[in-house]
Amino acid sequence: MKITTAGRILADWSLHRGLRENYWAVDAHLRRLLCLSDTSLRVFAHQLVRDQVRFWLGAVKPVRGETTERARAAVEWILRAQGACLDGGVSLGYFPCDEPAGWKASYPETTGYIITSLLSFADRYGDDHVRREALRMADWEVQVQMPSGAVQGGVVCTPEKQTPAAFNTGMVLDGWCTAYAVSGNTSYLEAARRAADFLVLDLDSDGYFRTNGQFVRADRIKTYNCLCAWAMYRF
């Protein structure tokens, strides 16, 4: 019997958690599902169920011939997420089943590499509005950079609650590199230098980054941190 992608994900998700972790994770998902009974979420619930069933059945297929339209729609959604936050950053996302429901606060990590994506889009399609909004994201990242040069983990918070994360720092470093290449604004270059210095000092003798942030166990080595090397190379 062929195992679907959804089956592999669910198996990996359950086998790498303890019984207690699985219980609380399932409980949280069930609570979210119960929220879908709210009549105000009927359209959202219908789309969610439809997409989930298609995913489970392996029925999701690529759409051909609509690349430009799909890219434009994705960019517009990102700009909507930016507009929901008012500070220039991009929201962690829209969560209608959470409490409180709605848009979450700005998220420094993903805003960082969104900058590069949006500036590439703006260059490809000659879109000055997207370019301005991407640079506004880069300005916001400069404002929330930690004194150490690091970028915090999680959604944006007050300075005394920030904890550094190597991966997030690398992702925002990539955004600043692109923003500087496009605009020549030296504030991005200076922020990038502080971020790169933090990452260099964070490497241990084996070449691993030590600082994973509050959301990852300190004793774990995260392979995806190697992506920071690309941003450091660009700088």
Image: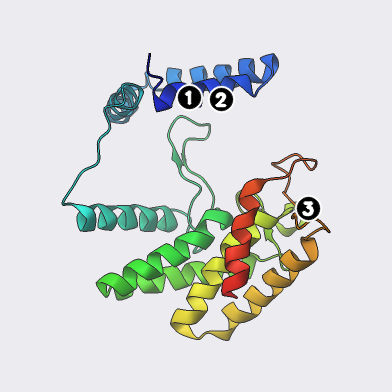
The kind of residue on which mark 1 rests is Arg
Which residue is disc 1 drawn over? Answer: 8
User: Residue 186: x, y in percent?
Assistant: 58, 85
User: Residue 181: x, y in percent?
Assistant: 48, 81
Residue lying at 73% horizontally and 59% vertically, measured from the top left = 159
User: Residue 87: x, y in percent?
Assistant: 52, 62
Residue lying at 46% horizontally and 65% vertically, measured from the top left = 115
> Is label 3 in a helix, a strand or a loop?
loop
Foreground of the two, 140 or 84: 140
Q: CA distance from mark 2 to mark 3?
A: 26 Å
Label 2 Cα neighbours within 10 Å, binned few <14 / some 14-19 / many ≥20:
few
Residue 171 vs 32, above or below: the answer is: below
Q: Which mark is residue 151?
A: none
Pair 1/3: label in front = 1
> Is label 2 in a helix, a strand or a loop?
helix
Residue lying at 80% horizontally and 55% vertically, measured from the top left = 206
User: Residue 105: x, y in percent?
Assistant: 54, 50
Foreground of the two, 160 or 149: 149
Pick whichever of labels 1 and 3 is earlier in the sequence.
1
Determine whether, in the image, residue 170 is placed left or right of residue 45: right
Foreground of the two, 49 or 6: 6
Count of residue discs: 3
Label 1 close to label 3 by CB (< 8 Å): no
> Is label 1 in a helix, a strand or a loop?
helix
Determine whether, in the image, residue 55 is placed left or right of residue 166: left
Which residue is disc 3 drawn over? Answer: 210
The kind of residue on which mark 2 rests is Asp
Label 2 close to label 3 by CB (< 8 Å): no
Label 1 close to label 2 by CB (< 8 Å): yes
Which residue is disc 2 drawn over? Answer: 12
